[in-house]
Structures are given as structure tokens and as C-alpha cells.
Image (spheres, rainbow, N blue to C red):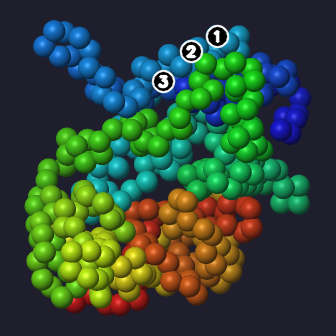
Amino acid sequence: MKQQGQKKRVVVGLSGGVDSAVTAYLLKQQGHEVIGIFMKNWEDDDRSADDTGAEIDPGYCTSNIDFVDAAAVADVLGIEIEHVNFATDYKDRVFAEFVREYQAGRTPNPDILCNAEIKFKAFLDHAMRLGAEKIATGHYARVRHNESTDRFELLKGLDASKDQSYFLHRLNQAQLTHTWFPVGELHKTEVRRIADEIGLPNAKKKDSTGICFIGERPFREFLNRYIAMEPGPIKNPKGQTIGEHVGLSFYTLGQRQGLGIGGLKAKGAQKGGGEHTPWFVARKDLQTNTLWVVQGHDHPWLLSRSLSALDASWVAGISPQASATLSAKTRYRQEDATTQLHNENAAGFTLNFPDPQWAVTPGQSAVLYDGEVCLGGGVIAAVVQLEAAL
């Protein structure tokens, strides 16, 4: 990894995972004064007891377990660790918006808002009060200072399969000025190798895939605590009712699993055999409380050539040039797609795609890139699909 300049006081967000652990190790190896912070941002860890009083394991990693892992890492590395509770900030700045978006029938990305409002705002502010000159996290991204523009740039992580710049696109110049992403210079296999080599207790801990700070829990069950189920019809493109949904908030565009309607056999399949063509969620009509589904991954209802986005945020503090040809992601893990940007106003923009994009989802983020540089993005508000609705 690149040497991080002169020695500084660096506060590292220790999550209990291997990436942040190796981040702290690399910075300490460079001679920096490293302090660990464990952020607790969710009060309810879902622990309960059975009839005998014995604690029941909920089946996913809770914040208490994560803190134990983070503390064990700090002990091995010989650094201090502080447990900080940002639960109020999280519920006010992130979770409330998360629930509002689901209630409106959209599919938000809480990790993006969590990064902008908690990890690089509340956490950054706390670190600065501790006298930190820099903060660091285990994200797979990079920060570069562009001498010609005198601005900081957010770059993709070198490991394309782990790049997390999509989740960080709302970071601004003030935040990037104080931020390092050491493992962004490495591949995940190298991070694992370092952790194993130095004997970190979480070297083989699996990567988290749950909601930011809320964790890996049964999502529909969790969401139902805050949003009531409102059953309604599931209809196919012919307008035929083929099932019942539990509530539009509990589905997302492109969803294939958990629809409860099975699949129809592909055309020409023999009776008693053959493959079934799966159903996909294609539209949600809040006015009639109808979930529309289609068969086939490439059905026209799932494809779009244009989208409009609001709540734009640009890393450089200014929007890219109008009519610029860039690349974009409309969801994480998606391949970069060539697009043309049209600025509508300071807060929004439109993207046009020469190649149709699959299951573009309101509430998710459209993130723009110029090569390896993440420029920023906005929240998808509307989509123009290839085929009109009934």
C-alpha cells in the first residue's frame, strides 16, 4: 500500500471485520498514532431468552459480537479502542428516511446515507474532537489529490470485485480531505493474507452483507416492525390476478425470490418436465396497491433507456459538464454502463443509456464515473421503460 505521508494521529473505524482491522494494522506499521473507534448505531440487537432464561442466538452477527471482535483486534494490535454510541444520530438522519422511502414504495440504499451522515460526519466530527488529523475505514476505495484542480478525488478500489465507491459517492471535499482508505490499494485476497499472517482473531470472519449497522437479519420480518403489511393483488402483463402480495413496501424491482407464485414452464416444455420461467417484479402501483410481475429476465418492462435523479451530490462540489458522456451504475455490483448526462437543475439530472438497463429502481442511486474517478450521483426518482404499462 502507498505510504500515507508524515506521521499523523489517525482514528480508525473498527467494525469488527477484517478490512478495518487490516486498515488499523497498516497505518500503525507506517508509524501513525492509531486510535480505534467502534460505532454502535443500533440499540436493538434482538437478543432474547428462552423459557429457562438462556440467551437465544438470533442467527446473525449482532453489534455486541462485533464489538468483542473489534476489541480483540485492538488488543492484538496494541491500540486503544473507544465504544461510541451514535444510535440517535442514525435513527434521526438515516433510519427515519429509510422507513419513509419504503413507505413510499421506493427501495432506498441506507448504506449510502449512513456513510454520508454517520461514518463520515458524526464519526468524523467525533474523531476531530479527539485531535485526529485523519480518519480511516476499511472501504475498498481510494482518495487522490488532483494537483491541477486542487481538489480531492474519490477513486474506485483497485480490487474491482470489492470496489465500494458506489456507497461513498455522496462524500464531499471536506470529508475526503480528512479520509484515508488503506485497503483500497489492495485486493481482498491480500487483506485476508495479511490478517492471517499477523494472527488477527477475525482473519477468517465472513464479510457482512446486511444493512449498515442493522446487520444480517430476516429483512421482511424486520421491516414489518415499522411498516404494516397491506396485501393486494399480483398481476401479470395481461391484467390477470395470479397471486397476492403482502405489501408493496416489501418488494423491489427485479426481485425474483419470495413472490409465492412459482413459475410457468417454458414454451415447448414436455408435461411433467422442463424448466420453469421465473417471475420478476416489474412495477408497483401504489394507487391500486398492485404488484405487477413479468416472466423472463429481459422482459421490456424490466428494461430502461432513461432515468431522472434528484438530490444530486457531486464529490468535486460542482456538477460534471452537461451532455458529458460518462459511465454509470444504477445499482451496486452492476457493470459500468455508458451514459450521457443532462443537467436539469442544481439538484437533479437525467441519464440516457444507449443500451437498455435492467430493473432500474426508484430510491436506489445512479452513480457517475469518469474512468476510475467517482464523480457523485443522485437518487433515482423516475424511469422510462421500453414498454408502456397497461
- State the residue in front, 316 or 180: 180
Residue 350 vertical position relative to residue 82 in the rendered view, above or below: below
Give the amino acid type for the residue marked by disc 2 in the picture. Answer: Ala
Q: Quadrant of residue 56?
A: top left
Is any part of residue 205 visible from this angle? Answer: yes
Residue placed under numbered mark 2 in the picture:
71
> Which residue in the structure is indicated by mark 1?
75
N-terminal of the pair, mark 2 or mark 3, is 3
Disc number at residue 164?
A: none
- Tell me which numbered mark, 3 or 1, is placed earlier along the sequence: 3
Q: Residue at x 35, y 49 (%)?
A: 97
The reply to whether discs 2 and 1 touch (Cβ–Cβ < 8 Å) is yes
The answer to whether mark 2 and mark 3 are in CB contact below 8 A is: no
Three-letter amino acid code of the residue under disc 3: Asp
Determine whether, in the image, residue 68 is placed left or right of residue 324: left
Nearer-the-camera pick, 69 or 296: 296
